[in-house]
Image: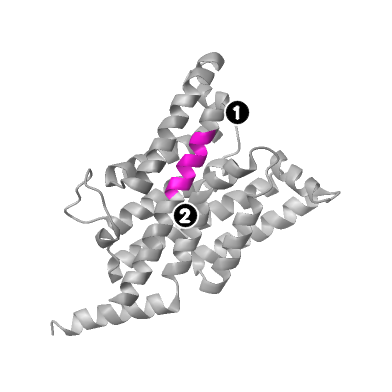
Amino acid sequence: MMLQLNHTKNIYYTLRVACAMCFIGHGAFGIITKEVWCNYFAVAGIGHDTAYTLMPFVGTMDIIMGLLIVFYPVRIVFAWLIVWGFITAMMRPLSGEPFAEWIERAGNYGAPLALLLLTYTKENKWLKPVSVQHAQLNEKNMQRLKLCLRIVVFLLLLGHGCLNILEKKSLFDQYRSFGFSNPANVAHIVGSLEILAAVSVLIKPVHSILMLFLIWKMASELFYPHWELFEFIERGGSYGTILALWFITKPSARYYFKTKQQYATTSFV
């Protein structure tokens, strides 16, 4: 029981913190009135001046959702964050940016989806706060959660790799800041390695290598030329899904749930 509780707590709190970081960080850009958001409002037919007026309200709502995850987590909020994270990420390709921008933000909607799967029951009460005691990590649910996390991590690594291959300007700025004279070559090498990493996670995630992917993902988000802290916080969904997958692939976790399933099967024979 203690082993189950430890694994469940690690995954549960990792995903909660990840969701909170993602939406608090995203909301901060609304408060700041990030200029590029005008392009996304334009997709909905909202003009430049109106977009600047609405940004702080949208940002405040995102921050409130993030704080609810921290202090009053309810399933209805998880569900809303899946939808909202999906929509805001999709605004990027709809506004003319590469489709890889949506793929790379899989953590924004994937982290709340994983949290909802973890706490899902047939008697779901959408407005009742959930806790670690509501987390269900039996064999069936663990496999479902693991598949979700594998797909999300695959997408976010694939998306970032594709943005390198497509020579995204902000990534070039990062490589130039490190002193690389030919950022295009660096971007192509990094992008190719990230795509290979994504495929490896989809085929079979290796516990020890996942930690390297986590370190790389966190490091790669630290060097944006503007608003570095908020950019880092906003990517919380990416870090959280990788870390949750790392927890769920620990050998001790696999052994525990396999043993538990065998015990449940034999106890009814």
Q: Residue at x 30, y 82 (%)?
A: 259
Query: Considering depth in this image, is 218 or 31 the residue closer to the camera?
Result: 31
Q: Considering the image in quadrants, where does the C terminus appear?
A: bottom left
Query: Considering depth in this image, is 167 or 231 the residue closer to the camera?
Result: 231
Above or below, 22 relative to 136: above
Query: Considering depth in this image, is 231 or 172 the residue closer to the camera?
Result: 231
Hey, which residue is sitting farthest right in the picture?
Answer: 181
**Real-space Cα distance between discs 2 and 1?**
25 Å
Q: Considering the image in quadrants, where does the N terminus appear?
A: bottom left
Task: Give the class, few, some or many, for how many residues have Cα within 10 Å of label 2's Cα (few <14, many ≥20).
Answer: many
Under circle 2, the secondary element is helix
Provide residue 217's location: percent of width, then percent of height: 60, 56
Q: Which mark is residue 219?
A: none
Provide residue 201's location: percent of width, then percent of height: 52, 64
Q: Which mark is residue 152?
A: 2
- Give the amino acid type for the residue marked by disc 2 in the picture: Val
Q: How many marks?
A: 2
User: Which stretch appears magenta?
Assistant: 19-28
